[in-house]
Image: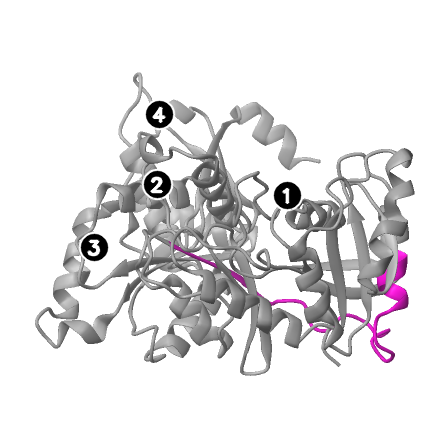
Amino acid sequence: MAVPQVVIVGRPNVGKSSLFNWLARRRLAIVDDYEGVTRDRMVTLIEHEERYFELVDTGGIGVVDADNLTADVKHQIDLALSSADVILFVVDIRTGILPLDEEVAARLRALDVPVVLVLNKADHEELDKQEHEFLKLGRGRAICVSSLQNRNREELLDLIVDRLPEGSEGVLETEPQMQVAIVGRRNVGKSTFVNTLAQAERVIVSEVAGTTRDSVDVRFELDGQCFLAIDTPGLRKRKSVRTDLEFYSLHRAQRSVRRADVVLMFFDAMETISKLDKQLMGYVIENHKPVIFVINKWDQLHGSVTTDRWVRYLRHNFPTLTYAPIAFITGQTGKNVKTLLNHAQMLFKQARSRVTTGQLNRLVQAALEKHPPPMYQGRRPKVYYATQVSAQPPTIVLWCNEPKGFAKDYQRYLVSVLRDYLSFGEVPIKLYLQRKSRSEETAGSGT
């Protein structure tokens, strides 16, 4: 059966996202005093007492969104509640019961789902005495907790596990085979693409710039395999990051790139490449992530621009990424989406590939003989041997007599040879040159 879902609900500013991060032991959701920070559903996997469940954070019930997305936030809450196996009804013990708390309680009474009433922000035991006031809400077992003071985390998890549906005790279903981060500027169609993958309204789709503030993880299946799509906030220039929300969104997106196996760099077919696009790609390159350039909304061009023209345009703007594949899709209709994902799987496989030391050394020596490195300080730089020390990304170490003798352009030549003749054709390769004397090499060969 599917992994049970435990949904966190409550009015704005009762600490739902702090509770989410605390239970997950990771800073996943943005936490800010600003009302309405959380819009989409945030989901993370929790294991407690050998039981697994998905913890779901939602927007505040009753929030009036500043970007006129109130109906969208409400719809996301409705979707979360419709799939909930357990509900955590969160209130602020310090403020007492407010009218919105009573509205939330009334709404939950119509649901046939176990509810745990979480009295949050009980930072010291003296506040626990106010528990009786909240019992009139009439929703489930109450527990006082504090994410700030780390009070009663294990007890809350015990309550959750006790209320999980029977038959969910089994081993966690298949872990995602690949994590794909979807990055790009605002309004390039990232969330629409994620919804197409999930075949559901999994994240809010809107033309309002910056709708996605958190990085949202969405599991989906393709040909019987499980994958994870990471929808990231649309990024903007650092000098334009004016608020705490934008600052945290930027860092969430960067962290999503770091933990991704493959990055899909989205462009709007109707827009030109910007300086920000190049900055985004600089971060992807810095982290040595396999990347596919994705030209979205291709159907809107109606043949006015050819794919060849876009390919030349991309290669001109990103000359160091000539190996990166390019895909032309329409995220809204799903055109070419499956082909794109199949190609992402190929890159994932390439990045995890390993080659034997013998194969690698034969190729490097052949490259050196075909195009020897220039003389350096009166002598020819030499490579004694090469080895692959890691994967994701493929990492190659060349042991040589003079690392400085191999100029950057010659290193690029060697990397291009590795890419052309090994299984790393479309992924970044890390190349390190390490000094080793001939005497060390001779001594090492005798052991």
Which quadrant would the N terminus be assigned to in this image?
Answer: bottom right
Contact (CB < 8 A) between labels 3 and 2?
no
**Which of the two discs, 4 and 3, sits closer to the camera?**
3
Residue under pointer 4 = 405
Label 1 packing within 10 angstroms: few (<14), some (14-19), many (20+): few
**Numbered label attached to residue 27:** 1
Q: From this viewpoint, which residue is outermost toward the top?
A: 377
In this rendering, the answer to whether 346 lies above or below 368 is below
Of the residues under marks 3 and 2, which one precedes in the sequence? 2
Q: Nearer the viewer, residue 394 or 156?
A: 156
**Mark 1 to mark 2 CA distance (whole Å):** 25 Å
Contact (CB < 8 A) between labels 4 and 3?
no
Q: Nearer the viewer, residue 57 or 326?
A: 57
Q: Main secondary structure of the magenta part?
A: loop
Label 2 packing within 10 angstroms: few (<14), some (14-19), many (20+): few
**Mark 1 to mark 3 CA distance (whole Å):** 35 Å
**Mark 1 to mark 4 CA distance (whole Å):** 45 Å
Label 3 packing within 10 angstroms: few (<14), some (14-19), many (20+): some
Which segment is the magenta one? 158-183
Residue under pointer 3 = 314
The amino acid at mark 4 is: Gly
Q: Position of residue 20 (x, y in %)?
A: 69, 51
Of the residues under marks 1 and 2, which one precedes in the sequence? 1
Q: Position of residue 344 (x, y in %)?
A: 44, 66
Residue under pointer 2 = 282
Q: Nearer the viewer, residue 3 or 359?
A: 3
The amino acid at mark 2 is: Gly
The amino acid at mark 1 is: Arg
Say if the magenta span includes residue 206. Answer: no
